[in-house]
Image (cartoon, rainbow, N blue to C red):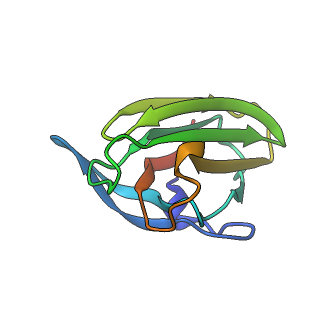
Amino acid sequence: MFLDEIETVDDDLNRESVTWRDQTFSRSLTNPLSGCSEIGPVDWVIPVGYGFFDAEIGVAEDAAEPDASVTFNVYVDGDPVVSETLTVGQHQPLRVPLSEASRIRLETIIDQNRRGNCNTEATSVFGDARFTN
């Protein structure tokens, strides 16, 4: 079940297709980040029967600041389970065990060196974010 099909608890990420080199992730959640604003963190209630959260996390290649980095944080039932920092154009698979959890939170934060600029500098991506068995 893709997260773009599920209502969030509060805020919401953008829903769009993202391509990295030769891979397209058509059911992605994105967050345009700047030093002055960002969406989130965003929470979902985990549907019963799913054991994992899977996504391809990364920073879109078309960033205004090519040396920006973004930290991806994932929390399960309030506990931190992932904290990965990636730079523009980098992406990697992510698999988070859910083991009877009820809630997941996704958060992305642009690096501290960018906090003075209010232009969108980089876009974080949760490519094809979904709950799986």
Answer with left or right where residue 97 lies relative to residue 55. right
Residue 7 screen position, x and y as percent: 64, 70
Vertical position of residue 24 compared to residue 97: above or below: below
Q: Residue at x 38, y 58 (%)?
A: 27
Q: Residue at x 65, y 34 (%)?
A: 51
Query: In this view of the protein, can residue 111 be seen by the observer?
Result: no
Answer with left or right where residue 28 lies relative to residue 26. right
Q: Residue at x 39, y 45 (%)?
A: 59
Q: From this viewpoint, which residue is outermost toward the left?
A: 22
Q: From this viewpoint, which residue is outermost toward the right?
A: 78
Residue 118 screen position, x and y as percent: 51, 67
Answer with left or right where residue 8 lies relative to residue 94. right
Q: Residue at x 71, y 51 (%)?
A: 46
Residue 22 screen position, x and y as percent: 15, 41
Residue 108 screen position, x and y as percent: 59, 49
Vertical position of residue 54 compared to residue 119: above or below: above
Vertical position of residue 96 compared to residue 36: above or below: above
Name the image quarter holding the C terminus.
top right
Quadrant of the rendered image containing residue 58: top left
